[in-house]
Amino acid sequence: DTGVSQDPRHKITKRGQNVTFRCDPISEHNRLYWYRQTLGQGPEFLTYFQNEAQLEKSRLLSDRFSAERPKGSFSTLEIQRTEQGDSAMYLCASRGQREKGEQFFGPGTRLTVL
Amino acid sequence: AQTVTQSQPEMSVQEAETVTLSCTYDTSESDYYLFWYKQPPSRQMILVIRQEAYKQQNATENRFSVNFQKAAKSFSLKISDSQLGDAAMYFCAYRTGANNLFFGTGTRLTVIP
């Protein structure tokens, strides 16, 4: 399978704990995006990488959130001191260099904060 | 600010019939892209159809077509010959250049056998 993969698929944690999610994009894609999707809503943009550079961050990305893409391949999204409001599906998408290229989405990581 | 509005939270269609999902958007940009994505239950989001704003011709992909009205900032999706596998959440989305997507709140489509 050469699509976008995310790990873990599900994560249950207690409030105050730290969690880290991983995204492996399609191998030749240099652009990587993180989105958050809450129940009944469309995905909301969190952050965007071009290669290893984090070029854009949404104001939704509070100080407790950090994302990295150290070698321009996989990416991690860490949430520190989780809160119940962080419960959501976290989606990763990747895209190639073509202007018209579409974003390919991964299956998401569903986070539940108790 | 870019906004995408889907005014139909839920729609239903009889199998083999045609259904149209509505989407409006607001932007000050002249060059942008519009998309319809499908998100089946517990499955990942996939692209259904794409429209470049500079193209006047409406995009079509097999049973899926759009009605793009640039002046009205309207971008509806028509599904012809609906199939059971079309049941899903459908999201309208917008982007400029290499930037991120802005999504609407989605329309849940039910296909009735």
Image: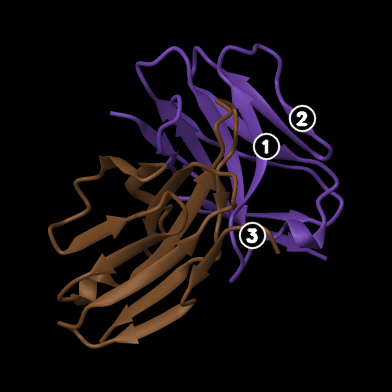
Chain colours: A brown, B purple
Callout 3 secondary element: strand
Say whether disc 2 or disc 1 marks the residue closer to the N-terminus. Answer: 1
Q: Where residue A65 sits in the image (x, y, percent)?
A: 21, 61
Please, what is the three-letter code of the amino acid marked with disc 2?
Thr
Q: Where residue B79 sits in the image (x, y, percent)?
A: 75, 42
- Left or right position of B11 against B83: left
Measured along the vertical axis of the image, is residue A19 above or below residue B22? below
On the same chain, marks 2 and 1? The answer is yes
Say whether disc 1 or disc 3 marks the residue closer to the N-terminus. Answer: 1
User: Disc 2 to disc 1, how far (Cα)?
Assistant: 7 Å
Measured along the vertical axis of the image, is residue B80 above or below residue B70? below
Residue closest to the eye, B12 or A75: A75
User: Which residue shows up at 59% across the image and 56% down it?
Assistant: B45
User: Disc 1 to disc 3, how far (Cα)?
Assistant: 15 Å
Callout 1 secondary element: strand
Residue B88 tag number: 3
Query: Can residue B57 be seen in this snapshot?
Result: yes
On the same chain, marks 2 and 3? The answer is yes
- Left or right position of B51 against B60: left
Please, what is the three-letter code of the amino acid marked with disc 1?
Ile
Q: Which residue is mark 2?
A: B60
User: Which residue shows up at 16% across the image and 56% down it?
Assistant: A62
